[in-house]
Amino acid sequence: MTEIKIGIVGSRRRDTTADFRAVWNAYDEIVQRNKIDYHTIVSGGAYKGGDRFAVAIARDQGGKMITYFPYGHNTEDYYARNTLIAQESDILIACVNRDRRGGTENTVTKFKLYHPSGQVIVV
């Protein structure tokens, strides 16, 4: 079976239990609907929000994980990291802000560029 890579990203401002549950449900739906046995979670290594959720899901499910940390602390470094996540993921779960601005939205835009027919689940 081909391994699928599920990108999980999200704003650090979306870090509640309800946010985690929404990401978990999206992840579970992808795995169940596609009957995925082998997968890798791809994320960005932040300590809050979608990246934190990605680590928790990978640990709980015993899955593999690829983490792309930013190389520095400015916006360009974070956007470069987002490019790697977008390129590497086959499906993307995005826990976005209501204003749809920032790094999560940057990753969604790049994912659509690299995977025009790829699936983005926005929670």
Image: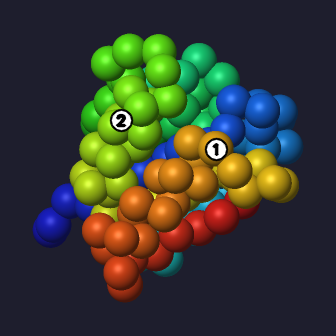
Residue 100 x/y as whole percent = 73, 56
Total marks shown come to 2
Distance of mark 2 from mark 1, alpha carbons? 13 Å
Residue placed most toward the observer, 118 or 19 = 118
Name the residue located 66 percent from the left edge and 23 percent from the top edge: 48
Say left or right for 15 vs 32: right
Say left or right for 9 vs 63: right
Image quadrant containing the N terminus: bottom left
Name the residue located 77 percent from the left edge and 49 percent from the top edge: 97
Element marked by disc 1: loop
In the rendered image, which residue does mark 1 sit on? Answer: 102
Categorize mark 1 by other alpha carbons within 10 Å: few (<14), some (14-19), many (20+): some
Image quadrant containing the C terminus: bottom right
| Residue 10 seen anywhere in this rendered image of the structure | yes
For badge 1, the amino acid type reads Gly
Residue 44 x/y as whole percent = 43, 32
Element marked by disc 2: helix
In the rendered image, which residue does mark 2 sit on? Answer: 81
Say left or right for 64 vs 2: right
| Residue 38 seen anywhere in this rendered image of the structure | no
- The answer to which quarter of the image holds residue 113 is bottom left
Categorize mark 2 by other alpha carbons within 10 Å: few (<14), some (14-19), many (20+): many
